[in-house]
């Protein structure tokens, strides 16, 4: 793609956007991003599109072009309220599928459809059917980080912000939680319901180690450590709080503190640091290579061409919607 010029007009139009992320982006970098940000914001209005971005997106997408940001549950809920003809999901493939499942009549695009997820890749619909045969009558709670086909075989979905609530809503003594073994262990530690699990892992969160937390605390015993529930159980035990990406942001907002470490994908620390200028963020940099596939250039290309549209078989989408909607309805009751 030809480089778009950083003109005085672009600089002026995009200044308020840059100001929001100035804490995490050097001024010298902005002339590279600003023309793309400006072009995307103009084109999305012209094409009646809305951009949803996950909390892990790079600051120039998160602050620069997104209309709605959030964790998986917030994005799923918001996807349902969208009125625009086209939804661009800056996240990974399963997030685009969730938006499509909830909006079968709208065009849903992920800027790079190759953006996968190690958890979604860890289980197939045939695996879920085999689990049903092995554990007849045991409900299957499926993390949203899965394909539409897997969701279609499930009783209800959950995200990292509501897994205990979803499990307990079923009112049964035993459930199967797929595919994240560590999320299942986190739930098992917080409920009396027996949890059967699958051996899927997030390739980003499984790399965190409890020993690193201990060392950090030796240097600074005042540091507050927040972990995503996709982390291994000993990491969650060593942290001060475990919650979804949105749960971590809420925690920082509600518990003013001097120094925080977020044990999650590291673009998230940039996005949160921009919001809380008085907090110092320690950033162990584990990047999600799938989330990183999204760039401003690809977002612009997606809006120009409508390539990389998400397609879900309507029959699969109808069955998957039941499991996703059940979770959304539960979250609405709990609010
Ligand atoms: P959240 O729902 O907490 O944003 O997590 C999504 C995800 O992929 C975490 O790795
Ligand atoms: Fe999947 Fe982990 Fe990347 Fe989240 S961070 S999208 S769970 S691989």
Image (cartoon, helix red, strand yellow):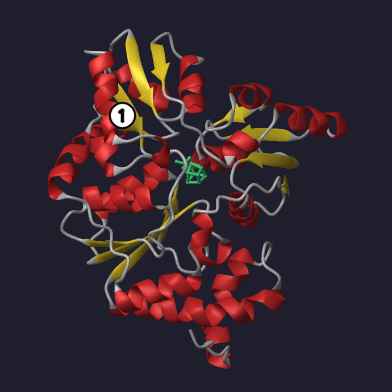
| Residue at left offset 71%, top offset 47% | 283
Q: x, y (%) of residue 274?
A: 63, 57
* Name of the residue lying farthest toward the left: 315
Q: Nearer the viewer, residue 205 or 125?
A: 125
Q: Provide the residue designation for mark 1.
A: 127
| Residue at left offset 55%, top offset 90% | 5
Q: In this picture, is 168 found above or below 25?
A: above
Q: In this picture, is 135 found above or below 325?
A: above
Q: Nearer the viewer, residue 305 or 263?
A: 305
Can residue 333 be seen by looking at this rendering?
no
Q: In this picture, is 82 found above or below 74?
A: below
Q: x, y (%) of residue 213?
A: 74, 31
Q: Does the closest atom of ligand 2 sit within 8 Å of the Cβ of label 1?
A: no
Q: Is residue 131 left or right of residue 14?
A: left
Q: Quadrant of residue 323?
A: top left
| Residue at left offset 30%, top offset 50% | 97
Mark 1 residue crowding within 10 angstroms, few (<14) / some (14–19) / many (20+): some
| Residue at left offset 48%, top offset 74% | 297
């Amino acid at each position: 793609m030809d480089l778009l010029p950083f003109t005085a007009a672009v600089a002026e139009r995009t200044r308020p956007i840059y100001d929001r992320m100035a804490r995490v982006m050097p001024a010298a970098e902005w002339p590279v991003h600003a023309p793309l940000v400006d072009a995307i914001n103009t084109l999305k209005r012209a094409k009646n599109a809305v951009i949803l971005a996950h909390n892990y997106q790079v600051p120039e997408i998160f602050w620069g072009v997104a209309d709605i940001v959030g964790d998986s549950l917030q994005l799923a809920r918001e996807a349902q309220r969208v009125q625009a003809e086209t939804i661009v999901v800056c996240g990974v493939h399963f997030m685009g599928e969730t938006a499509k499942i909830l909006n079968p009549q709208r065009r849903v695009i992920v800027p790079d459809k190759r953006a996968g997820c190690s958890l979604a890749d860890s289980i197939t619909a045939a695996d879920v059917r085999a689990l049903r045969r092995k554990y007849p009558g045991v409900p299957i709670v499926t993390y949203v980080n899965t394909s539409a086909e897997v969701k279609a075989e499930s009783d209800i979905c959950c995200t990292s912000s509501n897994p205990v609530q979803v499990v307990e809503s079923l009112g049964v003594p035993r459930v199967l939680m797929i595919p994240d073994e560590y999320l299942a262990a986190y739930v098992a530690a917080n409920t009396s319901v027996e949890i059967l699990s699958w051996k899927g892992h997030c390739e980003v969160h499984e790399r965190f180690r409890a020993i690193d937390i201990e060392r950090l605390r030796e240097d600074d015993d005042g540091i507050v450590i927040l972990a995503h529930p996709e982390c291994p159980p000993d990491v969650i035990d060593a942290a001060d709080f475990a919650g979804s990406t949105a749960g971590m942001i809420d925690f920082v907002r509600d518990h003013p503190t001097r120094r925080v470490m977020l044990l999650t994908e590291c673009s998230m620390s940039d996005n949160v640091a921009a919001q809380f200028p008085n907090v110092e963020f320690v950033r162990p940099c584990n990047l999600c290579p799938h989330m990183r596939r999204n760039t401003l250039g690809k977002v612009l290309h997606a809006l120009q061409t409508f390539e990389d549209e998400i397609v879900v078989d309507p029959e699969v989408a109808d069955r998957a919607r039941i499991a996703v909607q059940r979770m959304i309805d539960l979250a609405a009751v709990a609010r």
